[in-house]
Amino acid sequence: MNTKNIRRLLSYLKGSGPLAVLSIVIGILFGCAGVAIPYFAGRAVDSLGDIDKLVKLIVNIIVLLAVAAVLQFVMIKINNRIAYTIGLNLRNAAYAKMHKVIMAYIDRSSVGALQSLIISDVETVSDGMLLFLNQFASGIATIIITLAVMFYINWKISLIVVIFTPVSIAVSTLIAKGAYKSFAKQAQIRSRQTSYVAESVNNFRECKLYDVTSERSSGFDGINEEYKKTSTKATFLSSISNPSSRFVNALIYAGVVFTGCMAGIGGAITLGSLTTLLAYANQFMKPFNDLSAVYTELSDSFACLARIFAHLDSPEIPEEKITEALPDKNTKFDIEFKNVSFSYVEGRPVLQDISFKVGKGESFAIAGPTGCGKTTLINLLMRYYEPDSGDILINGRSIKDIPRSELRHYIGFVTQDTWLSDDTVMENIRFSGSHITEDQVFAAAKKAGCDSFIRKLPKRYNEMLDNSRDDISEGQKQLLTIARAMASDPSIMILDEATSSVDVVTEDRIQKAIRELLNGRTSIIIAHRLSQITNCDKIVVIDGGKVSEIGSHDELIANGGFYSRLYASYISD
């Protein structure tokens, strides 16, 4: 277990420090009360002939039992709050981190793995912390005070306990190390399980369509079997820790019984003191048993904690300096790519020495075969990634000098993947900001051609949406995303296969609205349907990650180059 991670975990107390101190104090008092009870019990045994004294001692024991019960109740309540405050802060930090990391990290991570980390792993850490807090302070107090009183009563008998206690600790530590490795592997497999289930649910129709449900089930069975084997080993190791330490402790207890009885026969110790010593011998070992059980259970928590901190330590988008603001949104912008090269994986370039310029208010299309790097150009313009070399300029200013949030404020982006938040139609369309009025939402919906079907919904613009609804078609969802882009009134418009989910009839209906949206705006359009870009002012053709040719549709057709062949293939289909 990494002590650095433990110290770091404590930093997530955030405001619960006084509660933690109070918990420790109450835990110590609880331990003291527990230790005092056998002491008074032993004295009661030695006072069997004195009824008055015996009654007083029994009353003391009853009071101590009541006090211990109250202290334990308060301690558990406080520890619950501390443990789940840490969980709350950890989960908030993990989720917030997801919005700060570089895009490459998100692309490399599966959805299920991130879900498992933020939800399941944090929950496991919280549960482990609760178990630890409930045992730690009271357990340590019990061990120290019990040992002190035992030495006070009879140091020779107490020495037996001290000498053989390290054996019990060594057994627990050895088992816990093995359990930690198994729990770490278990957490990894659990993450794969979550990813696999999420993938199957999100692509349920495709699984049915291609009749691969049996294959998917077999794949899940394999992961599940691996999880079962790892969990069985981890649980076995954690479960034998307590019995193993109890066995060693039983041997120690037997030694105390034998030595105590021999001392009692010789008159070196009273019956009451022997009773107290035997109770203390058992009580002294109990915290070790409990803490050894906690230690092995914490193995799972620390394995999850290591994954959480690895996520929190992942590379972030560098902090950006506040520079000169961009002009008003009504200003027209030009965009220039200058000798831009980029690769997702070093040594495997996706774009090489790309240069072209989109004039102010110009509609500019990017054409090329699948996988040539069209969408990657947009990823670079949006600063999801940074070029390996070269630069991208907006009105002559490098986008590296423009904060990402400000840059994206000027850009409207409609992708080929439709996404709707679990919210009303109204809030989905004005997703880019609450400053968008209802009238602007209505106007954007009418321009996008989705107002008519929205008004047929039971609650119209107050209808709740989510991506899983079957009564709203993919085409209608795409129309809503187009309305969302229109409502933000961007200065630069990017359409990446924006009508890919729309049928020909619907496409014709919204092309007029898109032309109105693009009118006067600098725009970049990516479309596999080449008929959608024939009216663009210019078209850049990308082939093999390089610029093949640039020109208008008519110029490129007349040139008889790659675009001409691409277009001929398109119209022949």
Image (tube, rainbow, N blue to C red):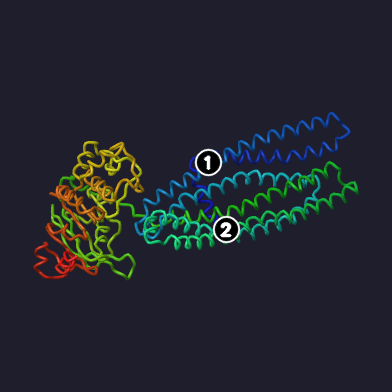
C-alpha gap between disc 1 and disc 2 = 35 Å
**Which picture quadrant has residue 558?**
bottom left
Would you call the spot at circle 1 few (<14 residues within 10 Å), some (14-19), or many (20 or more)? some
Q: In the image, residue 312 lies at what x, y percent? A: 44, 53
Q: Quadrant of the N terminus?
A: bottom right
The residue that disc 1 covers is 17
Taking the image as drawn, is residue 113 in sight? Answer: no
The extreme right residue here reads: 266
Q: Quadrant of residue 179?
A: bottom right
The kind of residue tagged 1 is: Gly
| Residue 420, x across and y down, in percent | 32, 47
Percent position of residue 349, x then y: 29, 69
Task: Please name the amino acid that badge 2 sits on.
Answer: Ser
Q: Quadrant of the C terminus?
A: bottom left
Residue at position x 90%, y 46% from top? 267
Q: Give the answer, above or below, for where 461 lies relative to 300.
A: above
